[in-house]
Amino acid sequence: MRLGVNIDHVATLRQARKTFEPDPVFAALIVQQAGADQITLHLREDRRHIQDKDLELIKELVVIPVNLEMAPTEEMRQIALRIKPNRVTLVPEKRQEITTEGGLDVLGMKEFLKSYIIPLKAEGIEVSFFIEPQVEHVRASKDVGADAVELHTGKYANLWKEGKASQVKEEIEKIRRASIEAKNLGLRVYAGHGLTYHNVSAFVRELKDLVEELNVGHSIISNSVIFGLERAVKEFLSLIKE
Ligand code: PXP
């Protein structure tokens, strides 16, 4: 299974102070150096974390594929056509949400999405839809012309956190059915959202033959803060102590 690392939260930390560190471009290069298969980043309409310049520099500097998550707006399409990420993942976006809630309503936006993605595909950009693991949305994604679907694992993660073992199993089966449908229709299958060091192993064990790639952000960036803290303190101390 491939790993795409979402670096948005490095930018979240920087934007908390509107300063220059931590730099998501630097983070993207480290993620690449560590062996990840892809850099994933979400340029939100409100620019709350990743900025346009970050996207430009990351596309210029990293050699592994860049997966741009974005809302299906005209502004974002123009940016994607200019920057040409390897993949665009279309996600729903609400201003007030803390993170992406729910999948794209492909069923309800079929005609719009059909024409929206044509110029992206014409530029050779892979188009993926971030959807709930429901076969109807998978079929609609195929009808619209997507190359891939990223199945939303948020519900799986929440049920796991709440210790609801039988519902976790049911959710895995839902994701399995959606993955099988997608594969049968010739769509590539990715997954992500809310995956952590705790819940990812069971997911991989169950779905490794169907899901090609995971996109993980918050948990990896959170743990990098914790794993890196001791070293950061020691280095700071070395600057102030004789
Ligand atoms: N995939 C998509 C489409 C997302 O919107 C996000 C969150 O930005 C992720 C994956 C990563 O989710 P998390 O940060 O919870 O790992």
Image (cartoon, grey):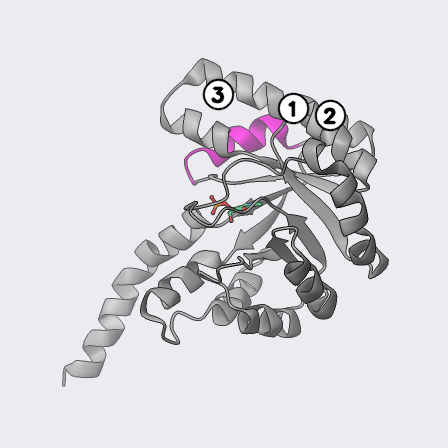
| Sequence-wise first label, 2 or 3 | 3
Give the quarter of the image for residue 104.
top right
Tell me the distance, in whole angstroms, between the alpha carbons under discs 2 and 3. Answer: 18 Å
Q: Which residue is mark 3?
A: 168
Task: Look at the image and give the residue range highlighted in magenta.
Answer: 197-208
Residue pushed farthest top? 166
| Residue 81 appearing in the image | yes
Image quarter where the N terminus lies is: top right
- Disc 3 residue type? Val
Q: Position of residue 6 (x, y in %)?
A: 52, 54
What is the x, y in percent for residue 69? 60, 53
Q: Which residue is mark 1?
A: 176
Vertical order, 236 against 211 (above or below): below
Residue 94 sits above or below residue 183 on the image: below
> First in sequence: mark 1 or mark 3?
3
Percent of width and height locating residue 139: 77, 29
The residue located at (67%, 68%) in the rendering is 63
Res 235 → quadrant: bottom left
Location of mark 2 (residue) = 180
Are the residues tagged 2 and 1 within 8 Å (C-beta)? yes
Q: Which x, y percent locates residue 51? A: 51, 68
Q: Nearer the viewer, residue 112 or 228?
A: 112
Is disc 3's CB within 8 Å of ligand 1? no
* Residue 209 included in the magenta stretch of the image: no
